[in-house]
Every structure is written in structure tokens, then in C-alpha cells.
Amino acid sequence: MGTTYGDWLRAQREAAGLTQEQLAEAAIMTRTHIAHIEAGRRVPSPEDARRLDMTLGTKDALTNFLPKKEAEVADYFEAVRVFEQQAVMIREFGLSYIPGLLQTDRYAHAVLSQAFPPVSEETQAKRLATRLERRKILDDPVTPILWALLDEAVLRRPVGGEDVMAEQIMHLVRLAETGRIRVHLLPFAASPHPLAQSMLKLMWFEDQPPLAYCEGVYVGMVHDSPSVVRELQTSYDLALSDALPLKASLALLKATAKDYGHHD
């Protein structure tokens, strides 16, 4: 078996005579994060790797040794793509778009085609293939448990046109009616909520602490600090408390799909 990134980091840390706690403090990281990297459960961000190199005096070795990306995704999303494959529960909040794991082929294509600056058709195709590959975790009928909390704006913005939207919305309805996911809608009439500024993905695992991921324009952040993750979980719960119940959410989804031209 070859040497993994975690093995190499552990060797460099031990050669420097540092404990995980000491390395974490010097590199401005958490000991838990260091432990997960060494165990191979997490992939450090480029910024993490740079700080580790500076702390351990390994020049650019840890940065250059970062695992190569296996798929076309934004740099800041690569670690999240790995985590969601390991999660046993995922709770998503969609502010402007349907979350990627729940997108249909045509909806995903419409979203990705809006990239700026424009990218080649080949790059678009690779990104689309990656997004569709991520959806395969829903092929398992049980794991991960997935909840989707959607702002009503997600339904009202006609991404790809009316036909694409009708198909996308009914895809959500079918997943929810079969019990594979839960969907709750935050109507425009709801009070301002604590998630109004960002999308959010919460993830739980069998053998490691939960994580949270927030994303904005050209930036994404994975949070593993227990206090920050708890605050984001609470924000999600508060927003969820203002959402429509499942049955009412499904009724609104079906009515919106009908407005877009869907017919039973």
C-alpha cells in the first residue's frame, strides 16, 4: 500500500517532534482537523496545506502533495464532494437554486452554462458529468437521509425555461412522495430568516463530527469548529420552523409545476 497524504503529514509532524495539538495551534487549525487529515478522512484545503508547510518547514511539499482532483469542480468544493459521499445525513438549504444533489440533467446544464467567465463546451460537459455522478448517492434507498429546505425564490426563478422547471419540480415531488427525501418550502410570506444570505449544507457522519458548508460567489467554506457548526445547525432549525409542512410543501410544488406547464 502506498503512502497516503495523511501518512506523510504524520511522519513530518513526528519528525518535527510535535503533537497534533501543538501542530494545530501553530498552523491555526483544530486538533480534530489534523487528526482527520492524518486518518485520511479529510482532504486539506490549499490554504491548510500552505500553513502546514510553513509550520513544519517543508517548503511546498505538503501543498504539492495534495491529492489530485478526480473531477471537474471548483477548488473550494472538492473536499465537500468527498464528504457528502461519506455522510449518513445531509440537510441542504437552497437560496437561489435547487441543491446540486437534487438537480435534473437539464436543470444542472442550465445552471452550469451560466458560468462566468465563460468556459468551453468540454469543461461544461465535465462539470455536468461530475454533478450527475454526485447524485448517485441517492441510489441507495436509505443512506444518506436527505432533507431539502428551499426558499420560494428557487421555484420562481425559471432556470432553463418553463419546461425545465416543471420537470425539475416534479423530480423533487417524486423523490419526496417515495420517502427518499423530505422537502420543505420557505414561502415569501415567512419572516426574515437567519439563512437569507447564503446556501448551507449540513453533514453528519458515522465516525467523525458533523460539518457545515456555506457558499457564496466564487467562495466556499467548510466549517468543522463544533461551536460554529452548532450555530449553523440552529440557524437551519430556525428557518425550518418557519417553513411549510411536508404536505403543504408538496402541494405548492405541484401547483408551481402546473403553472410552468406540467400536466398529470
Image: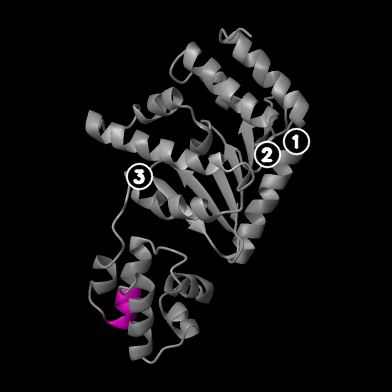
As helix, strand or loop, the secondary structure at mark 3 comes to: loop
As helix, strand or loop, the secondary structure at mark 1 comes to: loop
Question: Closer to the camera, 98 or 215?
Answer: 98
- Which amino acid type is shown beneath numbered disc 1? Asp
Q: Is residue 145 left or right of residue 128?
A: right
Is residue 53 located in the magenta-colored stretch of the structure? yes
Gap between marks 1 and 2, in whole Å?
8 Å
Say whether marks 1 and 2 touch (CB < 8 Å). yes
Q: Which residue is mark 3?
A: 73
Q: Which residue is mark 1?
A: 242
Q: Quadrant of the N terminus?
A: bottom left
Instruction: Tell me, for residue 93, which label it has, or none.
Output: none
Which circle, 3 or 1, is nearer the viewer?
3
**Residue at 69% from the left image edge and 26% from the top image edge:** 187
Gap between marks 2 and 3, in whole Å?
29 Å
As helix, strand or loop, the secondary structure at mark 2 comes to: loop
**Residue 198 visible in the snapshot:** no
Q: Quadrant of the C terminus?
A: top right
Question: Closer to the camera, 25 or 70?
Answer: 70
Give the magenta-colored segment's residue range.
52-57
